[in-house]
Image (cartoon, coloured by chain):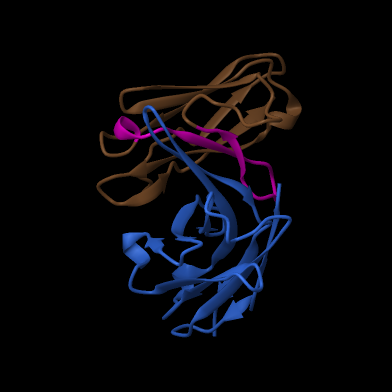
Chain colours: A blue, B brown
Amino acid sequence: QPQLQESGPRLVKPSETLSLTCTVSGGSVSSSRYSWGWIRQPPGKGLEWIGSIYYSGSTNYTPSLKSQVTMSIDMSKNQFSLRLSSVTAADTAVYYCARQGHYYDSSGFVKWFDPWGQGTLVTVSS
Amino acid sequence: QSVLTQPPSASGTPGQRVTISCSGSRSNIGSDYVYWYQQLPGTAPKLLMYRSNQRPSGVPDRFSGSKSGTSASLAISGLRSEDEAEYYCAAWDDSLTSWVFGGGTKLTVL
């Protein structure tokens, strides 16, 4: 199993851009077998998928955040990144990066998030 | 308000069998597999069940999953103290074109 580690500023001011990077070790972000995702969890609340990126650079974002989100992948550094613009206090959360495995079977598209990074708490406050 | 509905809490004594439900709609559970994640206190979520009823390597067979129509459930038999955690169900929603999660069920082992 690869290990994933989030990094980036822990404190972001309102209206500014949140930027996080996920470094993958023991696996390659250039593998065609996987996508790479970001999921967040506000303090004391549940999980929210932000989006996923494939090695080719194609992305898939949750509609509610689509206008704010940009994901990118850097194969030379074996990293993928998240940028969330115009943040507010509602964007305060633990941000997790995760590998998304997938395959097709006779009944459909099987996909899952595993493993996950340990998560990083990002606070939006002035 | 989560798209998938889970009971906020569940409990059981050691050795008991506990079931956690997850209710959705035709656009998510009704048309996709269900996934379950276990989040131990202070840690990241971990994949517990995929393809509705498949256990990843290393997950004990005390855990089982099922799906019927627009609902799914996770059963834990032979409950142990280390099973005390938050459990989340998830599915892809074709209408929202997004992963959706349940609000989580906090399992307490009494």
Where B78 falls versus B105 (above or below)? Answer: above
User: What number of labels is visible?
Assistant: 0
Q: Quadrant of residue A11?
A: bottom right
Where A19 falls versus B58 (above or below)? Answer: below
B11 or A98: nearer the eye?
A98
Residue at horizontal 52%, vertical 53%? A32
Please state if A44 lies on the left or on the right of B52 as rendered.
Answer: right
Residue B86: x, y in percent?
A: 59, 39
User: If the image is split into quadrants, where does the C terminus of chain A sit?
Assistant: bottom right
| Residue B44 falls within the magenta-colored stretch | yes
Residue B5: x, y in percent?
A: 39, 37
Residue B99: x, y in percent?
A: 40, 48
A67 or A58: nearer the eye?
A58
| Residue B31 falls within the magenta-colored stretch | yes
Residue at horizontal 59%, vertical 59%? A96
Residue at horizontal 42%, vertical 26%? B72
Residue A38: x, y in percent?
A: 52, 60
Residue at horizontal 57%, vertical 63%? A95
Q: Quadrant of residue B39?
A: top right
Please state if B2 lies on the left or on the right of B86 as rendered.
Answer: left
> Which portion, as a residue range, is magenta?
B29-50
A76 or B8: nearer the eye?
A76
